[in-house]
Image (cartoon, coloured by chain):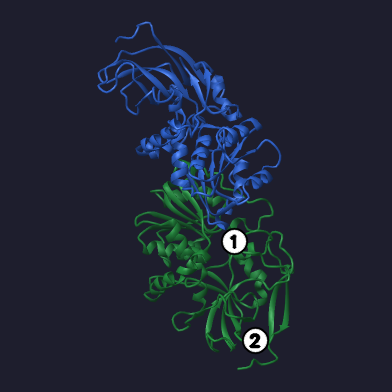
Chain colours: A blue, B green
């Protein structure tokens, strides 16, 4: 059970707080010796890392829903690990687990926050997507805050991204008209043809105000916002009475060096007695299982797709992360470690 | 029962859509002959008019929660009238009524939207304040959208205004810590000493960020926003988890000729899983009576104050309305017609 003593942990540490877009020089890459396990600990070999827009926020100083990554610390990341050594009573060598592995090749942990996953039920990367945080965010944000009713129009931005794709697929299953917003014809075609959305607006092509209006002839009842900025403002002009806007993220604003652009049209909330509400997935931890069982069923039945965009190599972390902000990922962005 | 034939209706008509602040030249003032009553109609002599920030929006073209005032139409306004002639089965000469009288000295109406009021229970102007639209807005916005719990901190802007004063007084009665935001020491003293607020921040004096923080040591659970702009942005930085922000108005933005300033800090809704929701009082029409009975009881018991700022003379309408936007009113702004 003892690990080969020559194994080193390859780490990616945050060494500077990025200004604007994160750069390679904001990180340090090193091989570090591994500590021997204490009782109650296990050693994980990290297979996959989840790259998420929220990571950008974790690099900033200051109060948020979670503490920032400390300077000099291994960059925080969710991931999938394999237990390769264990002195933990509940985890055995060969188990696969999901949790915050951080950006490194090995992790010594007491197991807190890690859950076993079953690699025979779904590919490992699915547990970073539909059956992981993005899926939970999509499910609970849509169902708890958005509370869509069959027949309503649900619009989701970042439609080809991890959260957006799942939001739209759930909304379709629940009987809604689903309209995506994505960048480029390829992503829009994917949303309609593969994910089954009713329509998808390419925000890079033409007047989004007009194309959204055409795609939502009955107005917008639920908007799941992953992007903020100009798109949020356009949506606000097309919401219906009692609309619900789920604020999940604002990827268009995360690398701003100027103040964030607030939604100028927010008074549409007043005119339409509408609601804008933020969600953080961790609040639903006690309900993850419920959503995973439901969505696992959809996946098994072929009613839902979990698409991951896998990039190889832990050292590509800074550049691969930037794909999210450039809209270059197509599906849930995952970094393959081994 | 016939009206003196020499009586003329003095009207204030909207003749131009104001750009920025409304000006006298945007209105026409005239004496017009009165039509004879048809069956089912009554003639009201208008005593008082309610001047409200929302009037500014009604002067603009474009979709809102209510149609704009047409060019050439008598300016829309709530008011208190006395029935001076009646061919209506339900209203008799001598009755006092509340409803949309518009800015004129007489009004021929079929009675639709008018409700009788009892001048022996409260002064007439109270029916334009605590027992009228501002009171209903305050009560239902706070209770239905804000849903404050005893012990929570409720902040209200425009604290000495018609809606704000009532919001704060209700919140105090419901057991909350109440902090007002108002312009000037006199209004703040009034909020604390007369209305019974726990504290009031003078936004014209010093750093509002610091003074609000000092007044809300436990953070902000409910914010009732009448002003928008910078103050909304400051509040967003101090809200608690699961905070509720009621968007009732944005008086700081109504005369903008540039785009409205959206709340740059709206992502605090995400961080705090908080909610921002608009209200329009008309949605609660079926519940006005319930709130009026409750607040009438507080007024009678001396637990609540209804303060009106009465200005004399219908022809002062444009300048008197501007008092709202300059913060020159102290209490609910009312125009005395006769």
Q: Establish if A88 lies above or below B26.
A: above
Q: Residues within 10 Å of mark 1 (few under 14, many from 20)?
A: some
* Host chain of mark 1: B
- Image coordinates for residue B155, horizontal then vertical, percent: 45, 55
SS under mark 1: loop
- Image coordinates for residue A131, horizontal then vertical, percent: 43, 31
Q: Establish if A94 lies above or below B204.
A: above
What's the mark number on residue B65? 1
- Measuring 66% from the left and 32% from the top, which residue is drawn there? A185
- Would you say residue A267 is visible in this rendering? no
Where is residue A117, by image quadrant? top left
Q: Nearer the viewer, residue B12 or A132?
A: A132
- Image coordinates for residue A35, horizontal then vertical, percent: 33, 13
Q: Nearer the viewer, residue A201 or A234?
A: A201
Q: Nearer the viewer, residue A247 or A218?
A: A218
Q: How many marks?
A: 2
Which quadrant is home to the N terminus of chain B? bottom right
- Measuring 55% from the left and 22% from the top, which residue is drawn there? A320
* Host chain of mark 2: B
Q: Establish if B147 lies above or below A72.
A: below
- Image coordinates for residue A331, horizontal then vertical, percent: 54, 28
What's the mark number on residue B38? 2
Distance of label 2 from label 1 (alpha carbons): 31 Å
């Amino acid at each position: 059970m003892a690990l080969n003593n020559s194994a080193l942990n390859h780490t990616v540490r945050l060494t500077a707080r990025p200004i604007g877009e994160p750069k390679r020089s904001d990180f340090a890459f090193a091989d570090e010796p591994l500590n021997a396990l204490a009782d109650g600990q296990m050693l994980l070999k990290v297979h996959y890392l989840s790259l998420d827009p929220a990571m950008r926020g974790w690099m900033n100083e200051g109060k948020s829903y979670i503490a920032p990554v400390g300077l000099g610390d291994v960059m925080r990341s969710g991931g999938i690990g394999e237990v390769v050594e264990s002195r933990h009573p509940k985890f055995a060598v060969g188990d696969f687990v999901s949790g915050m592995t951080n950006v490194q090749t090995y992790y010594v942990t007491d197991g807190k926050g890690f859950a076993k996953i079953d690699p025979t039920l779904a590919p490992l990367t699915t547990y970073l997507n539909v059956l992981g945080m993005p899926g939970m965010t999509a499910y609970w944000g849509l169902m708890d805050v958005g509370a869509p009713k069959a027949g309503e129009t649900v619009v989701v931005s970042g439609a080809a991204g991890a959260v957006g794709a799942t939001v739209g697929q759930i909304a379709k299953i629940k009987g809604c008209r689903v309209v995506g917003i994505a960048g480029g014809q390829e992503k829009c075609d994917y949303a309609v043809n593969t994910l089954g959305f009713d329509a998808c607006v390419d925000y890079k092509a033409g007047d989004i105000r007009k194309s959204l209006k055409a795609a939502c002839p009955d107005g917008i009842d639920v908007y799941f916002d992953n992007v903020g900025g100009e798109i949020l403002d356009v949506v606000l002009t097309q919401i219906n009475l009692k609309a619900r806007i789920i604020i999940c993220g604002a990827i268009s604003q995360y690398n701003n060096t100027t103040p964030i652009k607030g939604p100028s049209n927010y008074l549409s909330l007043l005119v339409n007695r509408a609601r804008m509400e933020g969600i953080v997935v961790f609040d639903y931890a006690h309900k993850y299982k419920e959503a995973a069982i439901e969505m696992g069923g959809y996946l098994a039945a072929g009613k839902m797709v979990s698409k991951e965009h896998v990039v190889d190599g832990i050292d590509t972390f800074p550049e691969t992360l930037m794909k999210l902000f450039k809209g270059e990922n197509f599906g849930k962005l995952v970094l393959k470690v081994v």
